[in-house]
Structure formats: C-alpha cells, structure tokens
Amino acid sequence: MSSKLEQLQALLAPVVEALGYECWGIEFLSQGRHSLLRVYIDHANGILIDDCEKVSRQISGVLDVEDPISNEYTLEVSSPGMDRPLFTLEQFARSAGEQVKIRLRSPFEGRRNFQGLLRGVEDQDVVVLVDDHEYLLPLDLIDKANIIPRFD
C-alpha cells in the first residue's frame, strides 16, 4: 500500500466508522492533474444512495480541513457491490469459497492474472485454486482483486 493510500485510510476510516459503517476499502487513482478518490462503505443492512451521500458529506469536510490531496480530485463514495473488491487478508478470509479475479503488480510464477476459487489465507498469502493448481499469492503483490458475482 502506498504511503498516500495509508494516509488516506488512517484519516478517513475512523470518519466512516464513526457514522456506523464499515470502511470496506479506499482506492486513490492519481491521473495527472486530476485524481479519483473512491471510498467503499458497507453495512449489514446494505448501502443506499442516502448512506453514500451522508458519508460523502462527512469525508468532504475532513478532506477540506486536512487537505491531504494537493491536486484536483473527484470523491466517490460507493457500496462494494456484487463484484466487491477485496483489500485486506480479513476480507479474503471472509470471502473463501467465492470465485475471484486477481491482478498482480508484478508477475508471480510467470503470470499476473489469476481467476479461480478463493480458498482463504495462509500467513500473508492469499490461496487461490486455478485449474487444479493452488497458488499462494503474497498480499503485497496484489494490485486488484474482485469477487466474480454468481447469478444462480
């Protein structure tokens, strides 16, 4: 995790949690002079647009005061959705048994993309079964991971 992302997580997660939501994860995509800050929130009762608006107002106020992002940016507050991104070992462990798609920052055993059954976690590794081969992917190598929704 980059230092900017760690700074934003430390600043914003307590704000989200104080409002009664789980801070599912934060993405910060720096795109030249204009960046995107996406904050995912979750709740046992689900997330409605009103929830996103309420959290967005609080986060905006904190960002205005603390000013951790020097250039222009867009703030998005969203539910993780059905294809929820996975950020932490705890989230990977809670999602064991789901189909996942994982992209790594750099190749691991000759590949960067993995799609298969999430088995769980071992130490700091995410365990994924792809075509009858089990991979232990180091969490710090994972660039992006999402659950593949099932429509049964």
Image: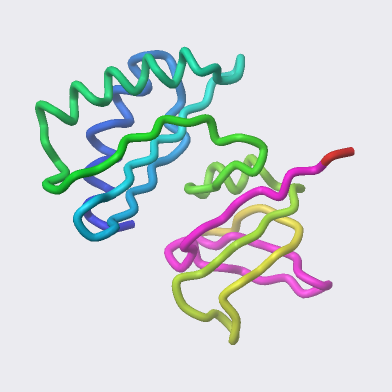
Of residues 74 and 131, the one drawn nearer to the viewer in this rendering: 74
The magenta stretch is 124-150
Q: Please identify the quarter of the rendering in which residue 3 is found.
A: bottom left
Vertical order, 34 against 18 (above or below): below
Q: Nearer the viewer, residue 152 or 75?
A: 75
Residue 75 location, x and y as percent? 32, 35
Task: Specify whether residue 57 is painted magenta.
Answer: no
Question: Going 53% across and 43% down the picture, which residue do you hit?
Answer: 90
User: Which residue is depicted at the point 61% across and 55% down?
Assistant: 121
Label the magenta part by its dominant secondary structure: strand
**Image side of residue 72 versus residue 137, left or right:** left
Q: Name above or below for residue 108 compared with residue 65.
A: below
At a point 70% along the width and 47% down the height, the residue shown is 96
Q: Is 149 within the magenta? A: yes
Residue lying furthest right in this view?
152
Tell which of 138 and 143 is nearer to you.
143
**Image location of residue 140, percent across then percent down:** 42, 64
> Where does the C terminus fall, quadrant-wise?
top right
Q: Position of residue 59 (x, y in %)?
A: 27, 25
Total numbered labels: 0
Give the side of residue 70 with respect to residue 19, left or right.
Answer: left
Residue sitting farthest toward the bottom: 110
87 in relation to 144, above or below: above
Colour pattern of the rendering = rainbow
Q: Quadrant of the N terminus?
A: bottom left
Residue drawn 10% across and 26% down? 65
64 relative to 93 in the view: left or right = left
Picture quadrant of residue 62: top left
Give the percent coordinates (x, y) of residue 99.
74, 53
Q: Quadrant of residue 17?
A: top left
